[in-house]
């Protein structure tokens, strides 16, 4: 079974997909020398990508929708919402004009000339330029904060503007709202301080307008960097793939590299942290021992003006976001050259050449600590299920967690809490192996492809590494592999799951498929052009008990209220998400701890219902949700009352998250010793430990764990008595 799992999830599976799926492209598109196109021409390249992606979607997707007129209409709606989420860029007449393509995009996917993309983006670019002029006009206009009027930010409550007057009215109100927020905050700060001389309201208003003007200018500059034709085509392609399902995506080469980096926890870079200050990208810190530090030429507060790849012309990053600049600075190869044009703090400009090195994202790796108290509780935080499929010797999450468990066992902990909150998933093999650390040999998850029989993935461990009490913490952002782990622990009765009303609900498997240029094939030596890749949903996860984790996620045994509950971020909130279904359960043996979890779960549930903090969080979140869905008054008196309500609720919510008595959390001896005198590592470790000590959800998990430990100790005492009696 290991061989099957490794094969499914490794890159050795890609050639099979190419043969079974993409291979058909060579026949369908005549790539053996007939009708070759110049893929350096954007029109030919886009047409090629569109056809190839459509071909793969129809033949390789787990549950493909028919690419027909209905599909076209859905794609068009998704594209409109992506390009104009606020309903302020396009006019109503523009949306009506796009209707000519509601039954044509499917034809374009199947080979008809690509017209919809060019028509819609031409209109978008024109309207975007107009919009910037409207923002500038609104900022230049005198604002009257005594008028009774409201700002309606929710686009679901509005239609697209019928004309320029209606469009400008929304822009004017939005700008007025942004200025009002700044102006009111400045007034509150002035009135609560003792600084003299006191600034007049007119001065504060002018400064508020200047601040919003600067912010608006920056917004338009940054957006323009993403408005290249290639970027807009990626948006168009993702409207298509996203209509098939939310996790099937088109990625250009740079985005694919970023995706791989996030999964592996490593990348090739220079070892510098960046931040945006007043519209400039500045060096916030340099990592000791890394290329930027070694050069001695990159310093904190240096402004990065340009980024160049080797001998290639440098790219001006003046209007870039930090994220976009980072994509250019990072590279695919160890030792590759990146050239930074830096503006030093003394005003001089300098070009610095650096060779990229391997950088580990320590924050993505498993960490552990010990919580002292009634019992000694081990705590493991796993931000994601990382693995580097390109490098077998690289760190893997399952191996790291096993090491953390061993370290905690050496400290004689009475139980282990595993924190998977906000863990978006990652390597399937690693989650299977990680379950094997806590259960006996057996099945972990079922994986099924279109028209396939389910594959049951089993643990590779020979018996559990750890047999003590276990609790698993999850939330609505725990997805994919995190849900598989929580589901397996729950199905095996191995421990108690604690978290929000459900996990995210991503129960699908994706594989990145490279898009092969039409002018290349397997039988010639012609050079190929990288057209990007398609992250394709081609399989689905099912619990060993039979139900999928898709859409519904995992419902914890103990549910605790939190501040994200009302935000629509789960899989079930996306209308294009695949559905929930079941298959046959597999045979597995329940874990028998010698006692029943039911009493512990019931006690904790009742305690949470009456706990003042959790009750307060639930009530306040509902009130903030109601307030957030209402229109915002632009009359300064009404706005200050509105803002006071928001501040009061926010302050109350923050108060409910504070623990009365912090937990006593200590680092493991070997971890503390490894910090040495590295100030950055010391600060990071200190932040990690403090975060645990003041976390009300960890405190609740500890309370549950203490009950588990009490039960466990009682059972073990009875077992010892029984053995003594037999002796």
Image: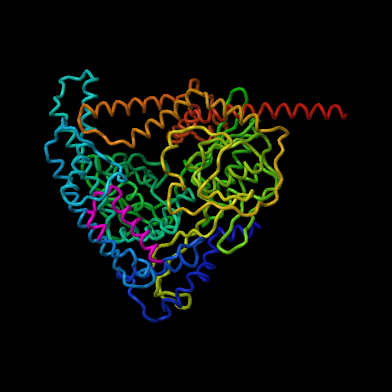
Say whether residue 369 is left or right of residue 410: left
Q: Nearer the viewer, residue 235 or 176?
A: 176
Residue at left 56%, top 35%?
498
Quadrant the C terminus occupies: top right
Q: Is residue 69 magenta?
A: yes
Q: Nearer the viewer, residue 570 or 472?
A: 570
Residue at left 32%, top 61%?
233
Q: Quadrant of residue 438?
A: top right
Relative vertical location of residue 606 with respect to residue 154 in this rendering, above or below? above
Mostly what secondary structure, the magenta segment?
A: helix
* Residue extending furthest toward the bottom: 34
Residue at left 55%, top 45%?
483
Q: Is residue 170 magenta?
A: no
* Residue extending furthest toward the right: 727
Q: Position of residue 597 (x, y in %)?
A: 66, 33
Q: Quadrant of residue 658?
A: top left
Q: Nearer the viewer, residue 138 or 441?
A: 138
Quadrant the N terminus occupies: bottom right
Q: Magenta residues, as a range?
A: 68-96
Q: Position of residue 578 (x, y in %)?
A: 49, 54
Relative vertical location of residue 689 with respect to residue 354 in this rendering, above or below? above
């Amino acid at each position: 079974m290991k061989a099957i799992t490794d094969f499914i999830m490794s890159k050795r599976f890609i050639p099979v997909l190419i043969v079974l799926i993409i291979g058909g492209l060579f026949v369908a598109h005549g790539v053996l020398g007939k009708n070759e196109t110049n893929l350096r021409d954007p029109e030919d390249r886009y047409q090629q990508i569109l056809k190839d992606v459509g071909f793969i979607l129809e033949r390789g997707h787990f549950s493909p929708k028919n690419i027909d007129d209905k599909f076209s209409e859905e794609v068009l709606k998704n594209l409109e919402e992506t390009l104009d989420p606020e309903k302020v860029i396009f006019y109503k007449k523009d949306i009506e004009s796009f209707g000519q393509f509601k039954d044509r995009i499917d034809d374009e996917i199947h080979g008809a000339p690509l017209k919809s993309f060019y028509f819609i983006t031409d209109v978008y670019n024109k309207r975007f330029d107009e919009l910037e002029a409207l923002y500038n006009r609104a900022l230049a206009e005198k604002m009257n904060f005594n008028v009774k009027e409201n700002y309606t930010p929710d686009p679901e409550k509005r239609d697209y503007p019928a004309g320029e007057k209606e469009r400008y009215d929304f822009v004017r109100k939005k700008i007025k709202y942004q200025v009002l927020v700044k102006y009111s905050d400045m007034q509150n700060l002035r009135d609560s301080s003792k600084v003299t001389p006191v600034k007049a309201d007119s001065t504060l208003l002018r400064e508020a307008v200047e601040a919003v003007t600067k912010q608006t200018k920056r917004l338009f500059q940054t957006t323009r960097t993403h408005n290249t034709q290639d970027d807009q085509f990626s948006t168009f392609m993702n409207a298509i793939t996203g209509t098939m399902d939310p996790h099937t995506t088109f990625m250009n080469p740079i985005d694919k590299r970023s995706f791989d980096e996030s999964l592996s926890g490593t990348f090739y870079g220079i070892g510098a942290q960046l931040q945006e200050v007043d519209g400039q990208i500045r060096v916030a810190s340099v990592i000791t021992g890394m290329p930027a530090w070694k050069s001695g030429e990159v310093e904190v507060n240096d402004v990065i003006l340009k980024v160049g790849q080797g001998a290639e012309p440098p790219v001006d990053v003046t209007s870039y976001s930090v994220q976009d600049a980072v994509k250019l600075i990072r590279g695919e190869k160890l030792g590759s050259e990146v050239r930074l044009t830096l503006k030093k703090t003394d005003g001089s400009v300098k070009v610095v050449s650096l060779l990229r090195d391997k950088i580990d994202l320590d924050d993505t790796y498993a960490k552990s600590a010990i919580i002292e108290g009634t019992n000694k509780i081990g705590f493991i935080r796993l931000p994601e299920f990382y693995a580097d499929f390109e490098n077998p010797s690289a760190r893997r999450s399952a191996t790291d967690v096993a090491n953390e468990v061993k370290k905690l066992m050496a400290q004689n902990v009475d139980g282990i809490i595993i924190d998977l909150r906000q863990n978006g998933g990652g390597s399937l093999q690693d989650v299977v192996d990680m379950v094997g650390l806590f259960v006996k040999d057996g099945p972990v998850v079922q994986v099924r492809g279109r028209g396939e029989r389910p594959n049951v993935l089993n643990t590779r461990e020979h018996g559990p590494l750890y047999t003590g009490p276990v609790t698993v913490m999850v939330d609505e952002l725990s997805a994919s592999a995190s849900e598989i782990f929580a589901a397996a622990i729950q199905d095996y009765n191995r421990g108690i799951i604690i978290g929000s009303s459900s996990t995210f609900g991503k129960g699908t498997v994706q594989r990145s498929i490279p898009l092969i240029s039409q002018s290349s094939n397997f039988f010639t030596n012609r050079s190929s052009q990288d057209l990007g890749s398609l992250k394709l949903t081609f399989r689905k996860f099912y619990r060993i008990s039979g139900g999928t984790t898709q859409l519904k996620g995992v419902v914890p045994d103990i549910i605790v209220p939190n501040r994200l509950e009302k935000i629509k971020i789960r899989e079930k909130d996306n209308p294009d998400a695949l559905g929930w279904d079941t298959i046959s359960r597999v045979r597995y043996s329940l874990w028998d701890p010698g006692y029943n979890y039911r009493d512990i779960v019931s006690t904790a549930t009742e305690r949470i219902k009456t706990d003042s903090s959790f009750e307060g969080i639930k009530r306040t979140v509902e009130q903030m949700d109601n307030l957030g869905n209402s229109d915002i008054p632009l009359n300064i008196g009404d706005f200050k009352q509105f803002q006071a309500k928001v501040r009061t609720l926010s302050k109350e919510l923050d108060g409910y998250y504070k623990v009365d008595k912090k937990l006593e959390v200590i680092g493991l001896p070997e971890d503390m010793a490894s910090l040495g005198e590295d100030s950055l590592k010391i600060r990071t470790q200190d932040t990690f430990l403090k975060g645990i000590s003041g976390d009300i959800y960890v405190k609740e998990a500890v309370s549950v764990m203490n009950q588990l430990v009490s039960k466990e100790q009682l059972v073990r005492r009875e077992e010892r008595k029984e053995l003594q009696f037999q002796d």
